[in-house]
Amino acid sequence: MSRTRTSIVDIARAAGVSKSTVSLVLQKSPLVSESTREKVNAHIVELGYIYNRGAASLRQSKSKIVGIVVNDLTNSFFAELAVGMDMVVQSAGYVQFLAHSGESVDRQREVIASMRENGIAGLILSPARGTEPNDIKALVESGIPVVVVVRNLPGVKVSTLLSDNYAGAKAAVRHLVGLGHRRIAFMGGFQDTAVFGERLRGYRNALADVGIPVDERFIIHSAPSRAGGVIALERLMVLTGRPTAALCLNDAVAFGVCDGLRANGLEPGKSFAIIGFDDVIEAKTAVPALTTVSVDPQGMGQRAAQLLLKQINSGQRDQESIITSVRLVVRQSCGASVKQSEEMA
Amino acid sequence: MSRTRTSIVDIARAAGVSKSTVSLVLQKSPLVSESTREKVNAHIVELGYIYNRGAASLRQSKSKIVGIVVNDLTNSFFAELAVGMDMVVQSAGYVQFLAHSGESVDRQREVIASMRENGIAGLILSPARGTEPNDIKALVESGIPVVVVVRNLPGVKVSTLLSDNYAGAKAAVRHLVGLGHRRIAFMGGFQDTAVFGERLRGYRNALADVGIPVDERFIIHSAPSRAGGVIALERLMVLTGRPTAALCLNDAVAFGVCDGLRANGLEPGKSFAIIGFDDVIEAKTAVPALTTVSVDPQGMGQRAAQLLLKQINSGQRDQESIITSVRLVVRQSCGASVKQSEEMA
DNA sequence: TGACGTAATTGGAACGTTCCAATTATATGG
DNA sequence: CCATATAATTGGAACGTTCCAATTACGTCA
């Protein structure tokens, strides 16, 4: 059990001052004289006092805790996103409840409820597939700032931070067209996520722009994972008039497609051009290095956290929607001539 | 801002009972009559009351929060570890502060201090490289249960959960020897982590057992990442009497080595045998599928969390050291004849 | 020395719970 | 109808802070 931890009054007693004074030195108030400040601090270290932030939060009814819930931590895109948030949250003197919903809306509901009971000052949510506005309505109505990232959540008045999926996909397809491809597939993902919709729209419009009709058979659904990519490629292989290139929903799918190509004796980047989306760390070192639309998940995480903290500190609840721009990073998997230069910057 | 959130006394007033009674129904006490329970619950939902766990923690001086700090969330091994912990922690009605130390002991110290102020009931630590016993001594001395995972931390009396690195490495090398290899490298990692030491020891002893002398040039250090694997392979390529096989520190390095081999025109699994360590998700779907020592990170995370919760609930602080067993999963990257069977179980 | 202004310190209430001891309501037996 | 046991309910103190109003200490000026 251990005896009760030493509190502010213990050190007040030891230093011969009042608890109010101790509280003042803890919050570095200029009101307290230099001499007593030193005396108090000495006793603080001597008694091994540790601040009870919970008690403070209770009194001030505001906490230094933010909640982060992420749909899939095992996907390195989201892991990096979380790391980016972690960096700014910690540096701002906050701690984070970080939970993994595993794409389950039920679990997501549970953890949000739990975080609420624990008094979070704000929430960053990368929503699970199938999340409904209702799932966070109570939260936002109670005045707690919420930032939705990566996946859009239409119908709820809340700040969002999304990447420019449409423009990214469009640029990628345009690049493939420029390399001479005409039969281009779109691989991976399911209908029900906003990300999928936006990237697919970019794909369609890019083709439309250059007058290539979309062959619906070339849009191949699969789980948005490496394993899903393998499966998607199997389905692609049996098509007549098989595509010569593909834009993949994300890098994980792209890697899976590469795996699948090799298993079929094809060489990614030579016999088949591939472009991914996200630019996860492995994209650069993989063989062939993956041409991909760079989203900079870590940077996105940072910006999301900054946005949330800004809202927490300012008390303003008006929604803000940020679309972060993306850029195509040409490496080897698309079969373009290898330029090292653009990686230098 | 919003008006102060509704508290237990608000609903007490509304229901015409005392706050004590409300508290009793919240904790599902059998003391309160069925009729009042219903009445109170009705007002709870009506007023949209949400429990203030912070206040409760203050009163009872015990919390439902555990701390988890992980050295590198962007490594999928650790991400999966975290997900495993998340599962059991959430299910037990706890929430977790989950922080990423990024292998920085300073940051690690900071977050542990911060978690302590926030009143965690226990801590699971996957230590950053260079962590010293002192970094957690204060914590354990204050009576808070700590479980150290994955990397050993000698010199501190604390529960640990490690995988059997020695046996795993030994089995892997034995397998390579059985396939006829005699010049076997050990690739990736730095001296200063316990994991490295244990796996290397397994490697050495396996070779010793069959009478193959260790060629120190074949032990190639590098960052324990995919990029590190690429670099390690470059160093290996220039050796005279070049090895024909390698055990890699972990799967990330192994993938990097595969990348490097391809870049050098060699085919992993045919011209060079590779075995990894950890069995991250991608190991199964990669091409060639990675032969690796399966550690089951998610399972480890679960067990670590269970161990911690057991200690929290029982109040016993005696240390417990668990070594989880590992098994060699033979796939294609080692060049053995492909057996599908062992994947079935 | 007394009055006054500023600097430093302090007591006590409050935050939202839990828990104990005490009280009140209800049932049971004679 | 009283005594008594049991079931329900309750008031108030406590947890460790913050914050306000109030107090005390100290120098300065007339």
Image (cartoon, coloured by chain):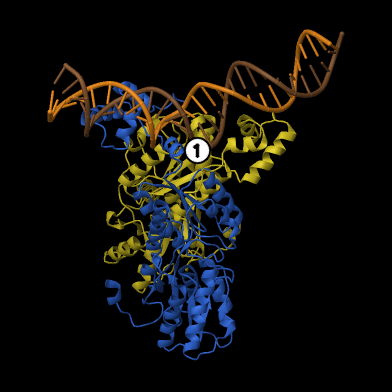
Chain colours: A blue, B yellow, C brown, D orange
Horizontal arrangement in the rendering, residue B131 relative to residue B22 (left or right): left
Residue at image coords 21%, 31%: A34
Residue indicated by mark 1: B54
Residue A304: image x %, image y %? 41, 59
Q: Chain of mark 1?
A: B
Residue A23: image x %, image y %? 34, 32
Residue situated in front as seen by the camera: B116 or B288: B116
Residue B307: image x %, image y %? 51, 38
Q: Look at the picture and state if A170 lies above or below D3.
A: below
Residue at image coords 29%, 37%: A29
Inspect this view and state whether residue B42 appears: yes
Residue A303: image x %, image y %? 38, 60
What is the quadrant of residue B145 in the picture? Answer: top left
Horizontal arrangement in the rendering, residue A142 relative to residue D3 (left or right): left
Mark 1: amino acid: Gly
Horizontal arrangement in the rendering, residue A55 relative to residue A46 (left or right): right
